[in-house]
Image (tube, coloured by chain):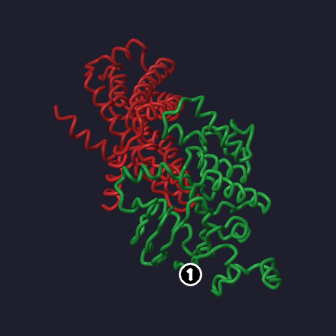
Chain colours: A red, B green
């Protein structure tokens, strides 16, 4: 509970005594490139394979001749949009971006760079962390969209090339009983996960004390705590947002 | 002038500083000396507000810094320049951007004026043609000099240096010391240096405060330090052979 209280106070410090909008604008652009653009390749690669494997596994488990083939694509669509794109990508995002945030801030802390900012009269938490959170909120939903597209493309290509499902059936299955609310749901989840990962990782890194060993410990804690928070939030959001 | 009054600080029950009072004069190089673990750096961090003391107050030209609200503290901090032990340069920025950083954040100067000021400060600390180098590409001594340039770029009224000579060879140490002394007099600022280097004490120490186990045991000038009559200070000052020989000659 002490840690949670400290986390809430930390979030509060992000919005007081802020710097100018121009300062944040530049930082948010820099962070967006770091967080988003540099993650596109990894996200696309992982998502494509996840989509491909989902198609193969679904087809393998659908043994009844009574189930039409296009159901494979429908299952892939639902799994990708609702879980694989926002949630599995969140775990990858926590591993890649969360660890980088915690490690970077932890190193800044132990090398007195954060103290240097404070001595200059700058709210170091706000200056360093707020742009990371805002950039994550902008870039992570975009990454989820890229992941969703790549996963479905992966499924389509594997399904077609391996002769599991014809391209026509796959497209038909994708459109079959499609509820656009699933996209809204996925994007709400993406925003929640982006906030949790960026804020928790920054919190863990910002309060690092000690030396290089502690930076490693903070980085590990950032990733594990972020993933736990994502999974809990995933369940809570499923409960909250599926009541329609 | 900076005045500290009855500063005490403890961490998890261990007393690190107890009842430290004193004054640091304007236009002078004020030194806080003592062996490792005596609380010098903690005192410095209490003075600049990186650590909140359990008791006591810090006054910057009669402005009570310890009890000031966040806005006033931020205002006072904008008059402070600090050189950290490891330089504390921002890894992601090159030398020029590191030195320009306080101007970017704290002023509305046009770029041309900022670059002029940055180049002046870098020249003042004896660095030229390093503007585009990253901190990882320069030596420890150069990092300290860039740190000094960054500390003075916004014309501070107060300059703090935490172990400016640590990790440097004797020749570079003297260069850094001389630079700190010169800047103090040139810009008429209040400089506080934390050190345990006797070369610094004898070289630039105009007003010296000696800490021992969290207490202030002595205060005086570099001339007076040889004849303080305080055993703990004598043990500290004459701990190396060069100083012992000097004492014998005196």
The quadrant the N terminus of chain A occupies is: bottom left
Q: Chain of mark 1?
A: B
Query: Can you give x and y, in whole percent of width and height, for residue B134 in the image?
Result: 67, 41
In front of the other: B25 or B158:
B25
B81 horizontally vs B236: left or right: left
Write the residue at 63% across / 63% down: B29
Q: Quadrant of residue B205?
A: bottom right
Q: Can residue A53 be seen by looking at this rendering? A: no
Write the residue at 54% across / 39% down: B103
Give the tally of numbered discs. 1
Outermost residue, top side: A168
In front of the other: A64 or A84:
A84
Query: Can you give x and y, in whole percent of width and height, for residue A197 in the image?
Result: 40, 43
A107 horizontally vs B141: left or right: left
SS label for mark 1: strand
Query: Can you give x and y, in whole percent of width and height, for residue A2 in the image?
Result: 33, 62
B97 horizontally vs A24: left or right: right
Write the residue at 45% across / 49% down: A121
Q: Quadrant of residue A167?
A: top left
A58 horizontally vs B168: left or right: left
Q: Dot 1 corresponds to which residue?
A: B217
In front of the other: A92 or A194:
A194
Height in image: A201 above or below B130? below
The quadrant the C terminus of chain A occupies is: top left
In front of the other: A195 or A114:
A114
Q: Can residue A80 be seen by looking at this rendering? A: yes
């Amino acid at each position: 509970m002490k840690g949670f209280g400290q986390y809430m106070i930390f979030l509060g410090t992000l919005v007081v005594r802020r710097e100018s909008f121009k300062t944040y604008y530049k930082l948010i652009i820099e962070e967006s490139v770091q967080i988003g653009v540099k993650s596109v390749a990894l996200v696309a690669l992982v998502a494509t394979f996840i989509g491909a494997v989902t198609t193969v596994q679904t087809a393998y488990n659908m043994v009844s001749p009574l189930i039409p083939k296009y159901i494979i694509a429908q299952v892939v669509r639902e799994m990708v949009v609702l879980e694989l794109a926002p949630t599995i990508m969140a775990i990858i995002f926590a591993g890649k971006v969360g660890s980088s945030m915690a490690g970077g801030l932890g190193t800044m802390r132990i090398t007195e760079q954060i103290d240097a900012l404070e001595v200059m009269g700058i709210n170091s938490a706000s200056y360093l962390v707020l742009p990371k959170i805002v950039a994550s909120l902008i870039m992570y939903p975009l990454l989820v969209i890229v992941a969703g597209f790549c996963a479905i493309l992966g499924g389509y290509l594997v399904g077609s090339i391996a002769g599991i499902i014809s391209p026509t059936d796959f497209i038909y299955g994708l459109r079959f009983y499609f509820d656009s609310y699933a996209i809204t749901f996925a994007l709400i989840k993406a925003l929640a996960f982006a906030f949790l990962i960026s804020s928790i990782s920054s919190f863990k890194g910002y309060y690092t004390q000690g030396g290089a060993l502690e930076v490693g410990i903070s980085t590990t804690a950032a990733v594990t705590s972020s993933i736990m928070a994502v999974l809990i939030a995933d369940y809570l959001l499923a409960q909250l947002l599926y009541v329609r | 002038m900076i005045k500290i009054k009855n500063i005490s600080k403890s961490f998890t029950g261990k007393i690190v500083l107890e009842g430290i009072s004193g004054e640091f004069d304007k236009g002078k190089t004020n030194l806080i000396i003592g062996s490792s673990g005596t609380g010098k750096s903690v005192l410095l961090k209490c003075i600049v507000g990186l650590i909140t003391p359990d008791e006591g107050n810090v006054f910057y030209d009669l402005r009570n810094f310890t009890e000031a609200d966040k806005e006033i503290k931020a205002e006072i901090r904008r008059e402070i320049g600090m050189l950290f032990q490891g330089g504390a340069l921002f890894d992601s920025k090159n030398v020029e951007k590191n030195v320009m950083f306080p101007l970017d954040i704290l002023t509305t100067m046009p770029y041309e004026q900022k670059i002029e000021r940055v180049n002046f400060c870098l020249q003042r600390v004896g660095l030229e043609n390093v503007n585009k180098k990253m901190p990882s590409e320069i030596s420890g001594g150069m990092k300290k000099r860039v740190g000094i340039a960054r500390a003075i770029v916004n014309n501070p009224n107060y300059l703090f240096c935490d172990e400016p000579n640590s990790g440097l060879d004797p020749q570079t140490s003297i260069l850094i010391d001389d630079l700190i002394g010169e800047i103090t007099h040139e810009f008429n600022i209040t400089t506080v240096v934390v050190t345990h280097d006797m070369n610094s004490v004898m070289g630039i120490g105009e007003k010296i405060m000696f800490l021992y186990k969290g207490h202030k045991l002595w205060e005086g000038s570099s001339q007076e330090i040889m004849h303080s009559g305080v055993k703990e200070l004598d043990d500290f000052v004459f701990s190396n052979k060069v100083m012992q020989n000097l004492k014998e000659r005196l």
